[in-house]
């Protein structure tokens, strides 16, 4: 990738390699003229996808073409130049135009069109195709937002295709332009800077997730009923984060394995090793978060079960105490019912009642009521109802 290829002939003299249903690309879209004072501003839909295009020589920007066509023409006229083209959600015609100009492989272009790709690094001849998943932590909703970045790196060009808000490639461009000694190392240096900013962007995400995990642990032991939903949502984000970071380890080791073959500058080798170390650290932290969330979810389930058991036990104890009170009330009601029954019978004023004129009738009734009440009391006492 360090050897420069000769600039291709103009588009009309190049042999097309399109297949898999991709159509021949049209001419690159031109930037529309500025509107007059009486004209409404042009719609940004077409031109808005070209974030910035620049031509560099020896690490210094020499021009900022206004359109893809101007970029192609100026790069052909600058044999030792490097083009850096940044796109955000480009149109199909723009991608096909770039593919035709730089001989990009149809499969890579198809992936860049469709997006939603896993992180990967593929080599098509002298062009590298890199897919990265950037991430940023949103404080307000306390969630992780993922973006997708496709990078084409050739002998004298770098094309970035961004799907999503992250990463901020304008900061990468400013950083590289402020260090021309690094930018003059060529497209590999730009790829390093992009990898570096993507990996550095993971650090705030890790810090934010760590705070979320700490808060979740507090909520779990506080018994917050909404914590289960938060654990599940954060676990899903960590799955996405793991898918974004884990492939980077193998991708960077693949780049380092090609240092000798492609003659990568020693300074870039050191930078890429540093990025690889950071990626390994981030990947280990993400794995730790997933394990911690799994453990927290298990602990939360255990605490919820214990709380439910405690509530059931409290209900059972309340039911038992209620039964005991019912027993006591029923026992005293039965004891008091016996003398009431005797007194009610003897209170009937009929002239032909037995023992009506018996001298011992009244004492007998009193003794009978006392015997019945005492007997019932002893029975209930023996059964532990009283």
Image: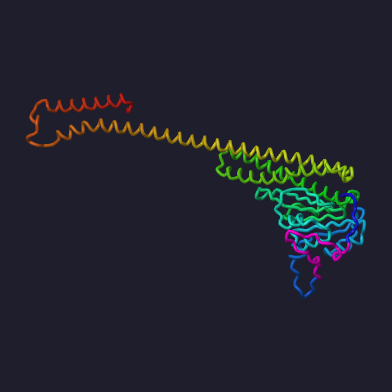
- Tell whether 5 sits left or right of 365: right
Quadrant where the image shows the C terminus = top left
Asked if residue 222 is positioned above or below residue 105 in the image, the reply reads above
Q: Position of residue 224 (x, y in %)?
A: 56, 41
Q: Position of residue 37 (x, y in %)?
A: 79, 74
Task: Decide whether residue 203 is among the magenta residues.
Answer: no
Q: Position of residue 112 (x, y in %)?
A: 74, 56
Residue 162 occupies which quadrant of the picture?
Answer: bottom right
Looking at the rendering, the stretch of residues picked out in magenta corresponds to 9-33
Q: Position of residue 293 (x, y in %)?
A: 63, 39
Q: Nearer the viewer, residue 221 or 280?
A: 280
Magenta stretch, overall SS: loop
Q: Nearer the viewer, residue 232 or 370?
A: 232
Q: Nearer the viewer, residue 285 or 360?
A: 285
The residue located at (75%, 49%) in the rendering is 132
The residue located at (62%, 46%) in the rendering is 233
Task: Decide whether residue 10 is among the magenta residues.
Answer: yes
């Amino acid at each position: 990738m360090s050897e420069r290829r000769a600039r291709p002939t103009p588009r009309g003299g190049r042999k097309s390699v399109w297949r898999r249903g991709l159509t021949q690309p049209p001419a690159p879209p031109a930037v529309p003229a500025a509107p007059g004072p009486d004209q409404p501003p042009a719609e940004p839909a077409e031109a808005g996808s070209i974030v910035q295009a620049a031509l560099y020589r020896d690490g210094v920007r020499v021009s900022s073409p206004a359109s893809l066509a101007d970029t192609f023409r100026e790069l052909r006229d600058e044999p030792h130049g490097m083009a850096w083209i940044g796109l955000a959600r480009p149109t199909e015609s723009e991608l096909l135009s770039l593919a035709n100009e730089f001989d990009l492989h149809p499969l890579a272009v198809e992936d860049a069109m469709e997006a939603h790709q896993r992180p990967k690094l593929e080599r098509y001849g002298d062009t590298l195709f890199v897919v990265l998943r950037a991430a940023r932590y949103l404080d307000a909703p306390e969630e992780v937002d993922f973006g997708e970045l496709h990078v084409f790196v050739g002998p004298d060009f770098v094309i970035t295709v961004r799907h999503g808000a992250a990463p901020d490639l304008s900061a990468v461009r400013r950083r590289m332009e402020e260090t021309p000694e690094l930018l003059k190392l060529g497209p590999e240096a730009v790829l390093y800077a992009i990898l570096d900013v993507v990996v550095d962007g993971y650090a705030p995400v890790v810090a934010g997730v760590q705070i979320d995990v700490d808060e979740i642990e507090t909520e779990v032991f506080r018994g917050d009923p909404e914590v289960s939903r938060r654990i599940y949502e954060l676990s899903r984000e960590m799955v996405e984060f793991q898918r974004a970071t884990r492939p980077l380890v193998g991708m960077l080791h693949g780049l380092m394995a090609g240092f000798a073959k492609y003659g990568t500058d020693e300074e870039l080798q050191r930078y890429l090793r540093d990025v690889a170390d950071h990626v390994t650290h981030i990947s280990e932290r993400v794995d730790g978060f997933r394990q911690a969330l799994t453990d927290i979810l298990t602990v939360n389930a255990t605490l919820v079960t214990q709380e439910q058991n405690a509530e059931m036990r409290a209900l059972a104890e309340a039911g038992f105490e209620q039964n005991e009170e019912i027993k006591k009330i029923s026992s005293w009601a039965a004891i008091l019912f016996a003398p009431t029954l005797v007194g009610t019978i003897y209170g009937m004023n009929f002239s032909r009642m037995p023992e009506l004129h018996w001298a011992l009738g009244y004492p007998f009734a009193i003794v009978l009521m006392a015997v019945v009440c005492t007997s019932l009391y002893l029975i209930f006492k023996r059964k532990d109802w009283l």
